[in-house]
Amino acid sequence: MKTLFGVCSIALALGSLQVLAHGDDPRHPGDDDTFGKPGDPTKVSRTIAVDMSDAMRFSPSNVRVKKGETVRFVVKNSGRLKHEMVLGTAKELREHAELMKKFPEMEHEDPNQLSLDPGKSGELVWQFTRPGTFEFACLQPGHFDAGMRGKIAVQ
């Protein structure tokens, strides 16, 4: 009985850490109330190729989409370093970049993020639900500060 209680206590404590990882804000980057949501791959209206390089740049670095549009980003890491593409608001990305400096080995598995090893490619499907200017960035330590960012204008 003591063993079962101990296992349950540990599981509860670990589950609580997950909640605390996002602070008091119940929203997560990419929640629908910020700028969009994961897109349905069968409802993609456009595909945009994005290259990430060791020059700490995205190409293209500016993208225009329509409100409600579902976009497939086909992302390639043409560099020799690990890079990532993370969609979010300027504030979310800035805060996350600071967190990555403290925890550089943090792995991302949220639907608004794609991490790629050198030479690899991947896809990110996103539906933009609100008009405004949003951003994408590489949050690997030092990359954001070096200017590895882009803008998404949603009209």
Image (cartoon, rainbow, N blue to C red):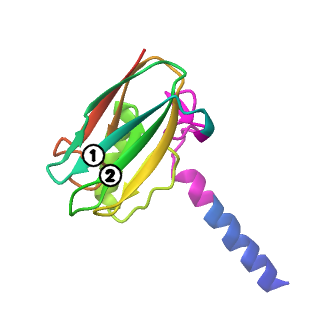
* Residue 39 lies in the magenta stretch: yes
Residue 143 shows up from this direction? no
Residue 11, by quadrant, is: bottom right
Tell me which amino acid carries mark 1. Answer: Asp
Residue placed furthest toward the top:
155
Q: Earlier in the sequence, mark 1 or mark 2?
A: 1
The residue at 34%/37% (across/down) is 136
Q: Residues within 10 Å of mark 2 (few under 14, many from 20)?
A: many
Residue 146, image x and y in percent?
Answer: 16, 46
Q: Which mark is residue 140?
A: none
Considering the numbered disc 2 on the image, is that residue within a helix, a strand or a loop?
A: strand
The residue at 19%/45% (across/down) is 145
Q: Which mark is residue 51?
A: 1
Tell me which amino acid carries mark 2. Answer: Lys
Considering the numbered disc 1 on the image, is that residue within a helix, a strand or a loop?
A: strand
Name the side, left or right, on which 66 lies relative to 16: left
Q: CA distance from mark 1 to mark 2?
A: 5 Å
* Residue 136 lies in the magenta stretch: no
Q: Which residue is mark 2?
A: 76
Q: Which residues are magenta?
A: 16-41
The residue at 45%/48% (across/down) is 123
Residue 57, image x and y in percent?
Answer: 20, 43
Magenta stretch, overall SS: loop
Residue placed furthest toward the right:
1
Marks 1 and 2 in Cβ contact (< 8 Å) = yes
